[in-house]
Structures are given as C-alpha cells and as structure tokens.
C-alpha cells in the first residue's frame, strides 16, 4: 500500500485543525506528518493527535515542505491561504485546503491552473461528499431512479449564538476582507457543492440577496437567499443563514420526472426517496451505516488519492466552480441583477 508524508500548513485560527490531525492519525496511507505553524500554537495538539507520526514541527511554512511531502493540508484564514497553497503546489504536493482559501475567485484561479499544469490535486474540504447517505443518494440519481432532474430546494441554517460573542466579532470569520464572505461562504457553500455533486450538473446562473438580519456588528452576511439555474436546464433555491439559538437545520430535496429524494443530515430521516420505477412505488428510507460526520473520511480519501494517484474526492475544477457560484451570488446581491457563473 503506497504511503506518503503530509505537511500540515496552518497558523493561529486554522479551522478544523483538530479534525484534520485526527484524520491524518487514522489514515493508513500517511506515514509521517510535518506541521508548520508560525504561531506555534498547534504544537501540543499535533503531538497529542499524531504521536509517532509527527516527525517535525516548524515555524515557517516553506520549511515544512523541504523534505518534499506528497500532500499538503492547508488550513488558514482565507486571506492568507493562496500564497501558501502556491508554494505547496510548487513543491509538487497534492493539496487539501480548508475552504474558501481565498477572498476572491481571482486569487484561486491561478492556483487551479498551477495544479493542473503540474498534474497535482487541489481539493477544497467539502467533507459532506463522503457521507454514506450522500453516496447512496448520488447512486439513486445517477442510476435514474428519480428520472430527469426538475428542481431542488436547499437550506442550511446554523446558530445566531456564535455571532453574539465579542471574540467572534474579532475573528477572521466575521470579516469579509479576511474570510471572503459569511454564512454563505462558510456553510452554505457545502450545500451548493453537494447539490452539484449529487446531480452531476453545474450551476451556471444565480440571483440572490445577502445581508445582516440579526443586528450584530459584523462585516459578513448572516443571511442569504439565492436561486440558481443548472446547465441541465433545471432550477433551484437555497436559504443560508445564522438563525437558531443552537444546532442546525439542514435539508436537500431534489425532484425528478420519476420521483424525489430528500437528505436531512441534522435530524429527521437522513435519506428518504420515492420512485415510480420501484414496485411498489412508496417512500423508502436509507438503512445503511450511520454517517461519519467527521473530516476523517475526507482526509483519508485525499491521502489515498495522493499516494496512489486514484481519483480524488473533488477536483480542482469542481472546487473552483463552487467558489465562483458563491462569489456570483454576492455580485447578484450587490447589483440587484442575476449573474453568470464563470
């Protein structure tokens, strides 16, 4: 089984770092890990999570790449990420990056070109693609069980509570100049990528609104509503916002000519569907293994693809298109006009 060394390139505020370290510790493909963190704040966590797999800790990102690791895992605030991803690709690493890894699409596009030129993977961390229910839903759609896609409705709603924390107000997540956007960029983008992955189609035009409805002193949106058109001719809508006191409400429903399916990852039935092609035609429920909601399956899948050159869980082009879709919605909100994606 091919193995590889991974460089973790992070800094203070690197999101989901503990989850990424756990995924690397569990991966059979990962032989060794070097962590590079100018702040030094992640050293204790790295030692605890990785144990003997941790073979070095650096305070300079470039030094973490000296021994030519096969993959780099980059988790940085969005504004800081592009130059670090660039040096990782230049060092011939495949890259798994925390999204959005940019504050405008123009900063990510040259990274995609560099990755493609060097035949390296550039994968944004859309971990929901690896859920068992998502795989089952995609198989149902791809096998034609609900027929030709007609439309979809999505919502992903999180808690308003975090927005009331003064510490959050000072973080990069609350400043669009550092984060690229608010709820839509941080959470809504997961569902945008997911619906394109499920239907194997691309969003080509969007319209929408984004703003602050909760009254907190933020430099990001806490609420967004968007509508979109796919390249297969179908349409969709999405609500994306921080509305709750705690927890999540989430929903993906897709209608087709021969039925429908529905994902509800946070409560409710994880996956149910109805198909007129099945006998009897009735609502059916997923009875497979429970979803692994951690980042470990994604990290392991990216490590495997990087080690043995198999298909990655997401391509550089798919990563880029998800980002472009969100930035197009922001343009639509600012101009009051629908926007082409691309």
Image (tube, rainbow, N blue to C red):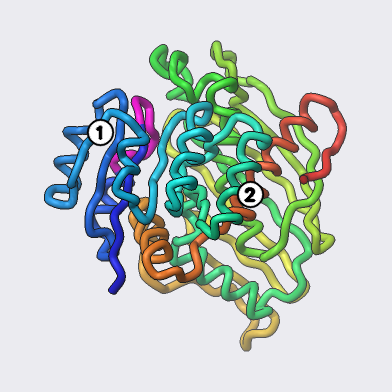
User: Which residue appears farthest toward the right when viewing the image?
Assistant: 337
Residue at screen point 80% across, 59% down:
231
Q: Is residue 160 above or below residue 258?
A: above
* Residue 15 lies within the magenta run: yes
In the picture, the quarter occupied by the N terminus is: bottom left
As rendered, which of 178 and 109 lies closer to the eye? 109
Q: Is residue 267 visible?
A: no
Magenta stretch in the rendered image = 11-18
Q: Quadrant of residue 63?
A: top left
Q: Quadrant of residue 46?
A: top left
Residue 147 place in picture, x, y as percent: 73, 76
Q: Which residue is mark 1?
A: 58
Q: Is residue 66 visible?
A: yes
**Mark 1 surroundings within 10 Å by alpha-carbon count, few (fewer than 14), some (14 through 19), many (20 or more):** some
Relative to residue 12, is residue 309 drawn left or right? right
Of the image marks 2 and 1, the number of the one nearer the N terminus: 1
**SS for dot 1:** strand
């Amino acid at each position: 089984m091919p193995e590889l060394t991974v460089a973790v390139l992070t800094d203070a505020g690197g999101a989901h770092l503990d989850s990424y370290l756990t995924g690397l510790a569990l991966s059979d493909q990962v032989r060794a890990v070097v962590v590079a963190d100018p702040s030094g704040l992640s050293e204790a966590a790295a030692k605890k999570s990785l144990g003997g797999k941790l073979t070095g800790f650096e305070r300079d990102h470039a030094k973490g790449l000296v021994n030519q690791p096969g993959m780099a895992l980059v988790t940085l605030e969005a504004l800081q990420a592009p130059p670090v991803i660039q040096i990782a690709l230049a060092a011939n690493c495949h890259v798994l990056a925390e999204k959005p890894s940019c504050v405008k699409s123009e900063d990510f596009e040259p990274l995609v070109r560099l990755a493609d030129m060097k035949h390296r993977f550039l994968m944004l961390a859309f971990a929901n693609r690896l859920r068992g229910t998502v795989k089952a839903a995609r198989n149902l759609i791809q096998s034609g069980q609900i027929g030709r896609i007609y439309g979809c409705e999505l919502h992903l709603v999180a808690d308003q509570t975090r927005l009331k924390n003064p510490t959050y107000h000072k973080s990069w997540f609350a400043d669009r100049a550092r984060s690229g956007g608010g709820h839509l960029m941080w959470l809504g983008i997961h569902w945008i990528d997911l619906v394109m992955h499920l239907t194997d189609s691309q969003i080509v035009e969007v319209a929408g609104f984004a703003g602050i409805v909760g009254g907190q002193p933020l430099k990001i949106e806490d609420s967004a509503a968007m509508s979109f058109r796919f390249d297969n001719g179908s349409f969709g809508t999405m609500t994306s916002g921080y509305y709750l006191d705690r927890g999540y409400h989430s929903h993906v429903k897709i209608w087709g000519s021969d039925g429908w399916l529905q994902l509800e990852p946070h409560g409710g039935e994880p996956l149910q569907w109805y198909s007129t092609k099945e006998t009897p035609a009735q609502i059916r429920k997923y009875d497979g293994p429970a979803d692994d909601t951690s980042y470990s399956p994604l990290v392991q899948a990216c490590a495997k693809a990087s080690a043995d050159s198999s298909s990655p869980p997401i391509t550089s082009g798919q990563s880029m298109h998800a980002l472009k879709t969100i930035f197009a919605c922001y343009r639509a909100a600012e101009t009051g006009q629908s926007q082409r994606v691309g």
